[in-house]
């Protein structure tokens, strides 16, 4: 996932801050930035966003202005905020930075960026510019994963329960387990890889681009991400008993040994279904995309401020 590294510095940068992310550490970020500005003379223009406004349009305007000024844009927020800023920086070829404020922060952690906001801010002034690969599905960027099938239904159910009971992690976990054990109608898909077609019955298709997340799931295809390839994980329809054993494998981080899991690496492939629009999860967010779905890896296409890689 991580490629070229070069030294760089900046005199000013724009921070896109989502104060509602994770544990709401927006005040800690602002305080750390002010301290850095006092010590170094750097300047940061902080743009605070909220769900009540058109976030995409505002962030796009910020990134376009940064392009004109040749300045980096730094995302301070959870996975949704980081994905949005990354997609815009990828489109306009702007260097981005990350101050992770979310729950999992796989992308930032895989780059060696501290989960502590104050430490992450300090890393920005001792950074390297690193070229990393992003995944694309119908030209929508994903940093960690994209999926369809059961996972999309799990996310939809989780959002429904969160709207009703609030964002409680235990409720979200129960919602996901309940969705797994519900009876689901299998989806028939046509998979096109390297010009070869195969018809499959699918419960879930998971496409990963983050070595750390794939490793945490116990999947052998983490080596795909290490080689800048997409990790494709296919799960056919299984019984409730098989589902139970898959949960055991997942909890023990041994999914690579589960007989119902199939994995392969790919630079690109297509998924065809009978539906004109396909419910897809992109880095934890539900979107409806027109079929067919075209997945591909875009190597060394996103410039990120991050610590130099180990070794």
Image: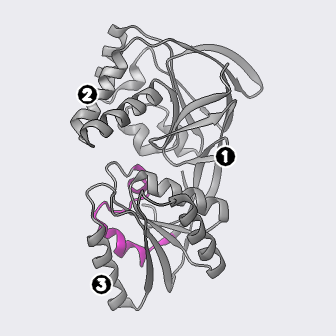
- Horizontal and vertical percent position of residue 268: 68, 36
Q: Quadrant of the C terminus?
A: bottom left
Find the distance from the CA under tag 3 to the CA under tag 2. Answer: 42 Å
Which residue corresponds to the image point at 46% horizontal and 57% vertical from the top-left? 82
| Circle 2 Cα neighbour tier, 10 Å, few/some/many (<14 / 14–19 / ≥20) | few
Residue 115 among magenta residues: yes
User: Which residue of the protein is positioned furthest toward the right in this rendering?
Assistant: 195
Between marks 1 and 2, how big is the CA–CA gap?
A: 33 Å
Which residue sits at x=73%, y=19%?
197
Q: Earlier in the sequence, mark 3 or mark 2?
A: 3
Asked if residue 57 shows in the view, the reply is yes
Label 1 residue SS: loop
The quarter holding residue 77 reads: bottom left
- Of 96 and 218, the residue lying toward us: 96
Which dot, 3 or 2, sits closer to the camera?
A: 2
Mark 3 residue element: helix
Callout 3–callout 2 Cβ contact below 8 Å: no
Residue plotted at (31% across, 72% down): 29
The answer to whether 33 appears left or right of 187 in the picture is left
From the top left corner, tell me how far across and down residue 185 is, in percent: 50, 11
Q: Which of the two residues, 190 or 259, is positioned nearer the viewer here?
A: 190
In the picture shown, does residue 15 fall above or below 280?
below
| Marks 3 and 1, the one that precedes in the sequence | 3
Asked whether, in this view, residue 250 is left or right of residue 55, the answer is left
Q: Which residues are magenta?
A: 106-128
Q: Do the numbered discs 1 and 2 sit on residues whose CB atoms are within 8 Å?
A: no
Residue at numbered disc 2: 174
Q: Position of residue 209 (x, y in %)?
A: 52, 43
Q: Which residue is mark 3?
A: 35
**Circle 2: element type:** helix
* Label placed on residue 139: 1
């Amino acid at each position: 996932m991580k490629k070229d590294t070069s030294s760089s510095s900046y005199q000013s940068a724009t921070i896109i801050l989502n104060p509602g992310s994770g544990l709401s550490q927006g005040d800690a970020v602002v305080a750390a930035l002010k301290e850095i500005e006092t010590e170094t003379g750097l300047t940061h223009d902080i743009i605070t966003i909220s769900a009540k406004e058109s976030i995409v349009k505002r962030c796009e305007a910020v990134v376009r202005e940064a392009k004109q000024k040749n300045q980096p844009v730094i995302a301070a927020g959870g996975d949704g905020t980081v994905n949005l800023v990354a997609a815009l920086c990828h489109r306009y070829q702007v260097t981005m930075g990350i101050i992770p404020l979310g729950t999992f922060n796989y992308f930032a952690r895989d780059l060696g960026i501290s989960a502590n906001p104050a430490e992450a801010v300090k890393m920005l002034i001792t950074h390297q510019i690193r070229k990393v690969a992003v995944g694309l599905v119908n030209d929508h960027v994903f940093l960690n994963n994209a999926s369809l099938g059961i996972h999309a239904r799990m996310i939809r159910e989780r959002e429904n329960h969160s709207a009703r009971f609030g964002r409680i992690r235990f409720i979200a976990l129960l919602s996901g387990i309940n969705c797994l054990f519900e009876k689901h109608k299998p989806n028939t898909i046509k998979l096109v890889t390297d010009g070869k077609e195969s018809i499959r019955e699918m419960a879930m298709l998971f496409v990963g681009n983050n070595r750390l997340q794939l490793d945490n799931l116990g999947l052998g295809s983490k080596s795909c991400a290490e080689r800048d390839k997409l990790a494709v994980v296919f799960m056919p329809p299984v019984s409730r008993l098989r589902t139970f054993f898959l949960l055991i494998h997942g909890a023990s981080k041994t999914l690579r040994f589960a007989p119902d899991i199939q994995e392969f690496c790919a630079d690109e492939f297509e998924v065809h279904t009978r539906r004109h629009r396909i419910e897809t999860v992109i880095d934890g967010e539900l979107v409806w995309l027109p079929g067919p779905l075209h997945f591909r890896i875009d190597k060394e296409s996103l410039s990120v401020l991050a610590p130099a890689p180990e070794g």
